[in-house]
Image (tube, grey):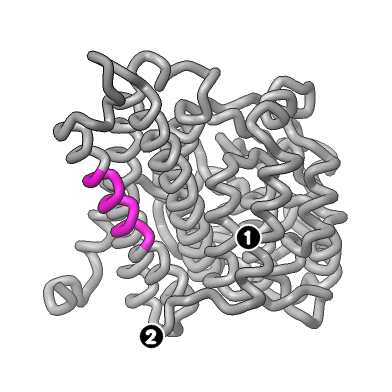
Amino acid sequence: MDFNYTPEQQQFRDALRRFIDKDYTFEHRNKIVRSEQGTSEQAWATLTELGMTALPIPEEQGGFNGSAVDMLVVMQELGRGIVIEPYFATVFGAQFLKLAGGHDDLLEQVAGGELKMAAALGEKQARHELFDIATSAKPDGDGFIINGTKTVVIHGAQAGKIIVSARTGGGQRDTDGISLFVVSSDAGGVSCRDYRTIDCQRAADITFANVHVPASALLGKAGDGWDILETAADYGATLLCAEAVGAMDALNGATLEYLKTRQQFGVPIGKFQALQHRMAEMFMQAEQARSMATLAAVKVSSEDANERRRTVSAAKARIGQALKYVGQQAVQLHGGMGVTNELPAAHHFKRLTMIELTLGDTDHHLARFASQADFRTAA
């Protein structure tokens, strides 16, 4: 298998890296974080101009029909630059539309950068179990009435359209009876509490109080939304794996540079063998994570659902272990400076921590991996 990037992938990577290095520096990012909105319309316009919003969208809707491997390249660069724009939330939401079909107009808006999206999937009692849904959607004339609250919706307040999982049947923890809807953020009855997360991204708790949506808002068939939800969640987890690899690369690079410049007893601390061993282990952890992220990107579109589940969960679990080691060691090797907001290292570590907790942590994906029917034979 050829693991080299294609010329087109290299072009996307280089263009995005130039933008981040020149116009999305750490200092500029901090100004955006402290702004009232917490994101930058100018940066979003640049991402659109570079073709990032169009990359995962089918050609029929004005996109480039990029694969998960193409997105791997982009997400690594976003992780490297700890970009806080609602890119992941938007392409994650768009994946639901692609899987369900029938919303070409919205995909065209995403491709053109006109529409930002979010996925409201989690609830306070659910932890990482996305099938644990108390939000209800009851038939009402030519549509549905949605009631419930979704928590920690990534960039929920910045989205124009929100993917909402709701229950039209079955018990609260059943996979049957789950339906998916695309809801306008300004619909009557939708209220949003926006806040900043520890990694300086934005999230929101969104309440739906008697929100009426037309039948056209339904994605797929009523009560049969679990397959789309699980498939899209695996895609989202794959993107996060790639972002984590980019963040670990940046963190390793910053730590290595610090070891070369920080002096103790008259020599750079990188001369100490014990610290060299730590740095070597950090590098190996990041390389293993890169391999798993690449494998997940290749297999996430597999027609074999068991293969997809097994590979994505293995990647999220292994990368969860790697990011914890790399992040903690980077903080230790930086000393007290490693936990201050003055250095990018602390921000990379906090972003890695949030990636670990998004769309299933290490323990969740280890359990999911082991629960697959072919677990023993695959091992």
Rendered location of residue 92, percent (x, y): 62, 57
Residue 125 visible to the viewer = no
Part of the protein shown in magenta = 280-290
Asked if residue 125 lies left or right of residue 148, the reply is left
Name the side, left or right, on which 139 lies relative to 252.
Answer: right
Label 2 CA crowd tier, 10 Å (few <14, some 14–19, many 20+):
few
| Circle 1: residue type | Leu
Q: Residues within 10 Å of mark 1 (few under 14, many from 20)?
A: many
Q: Which residue lies at the image location 73% right of the left edge and 49% below the top edge?
A: 19
Return the mark for residue 180.
Answer: 1
Q: Quadrant of residue 20?
A: top right
Position of 213 relative to 259 (above/below): below
Q: CA distance from mark 2 to mark 1?
A: 37 Å
Residue where numbered disc 2 is placed: 1
* Quadrant occupied by the C terminus: bottom left
Instruction: Find residue 143 and report its image quarter.
Output: bottom right
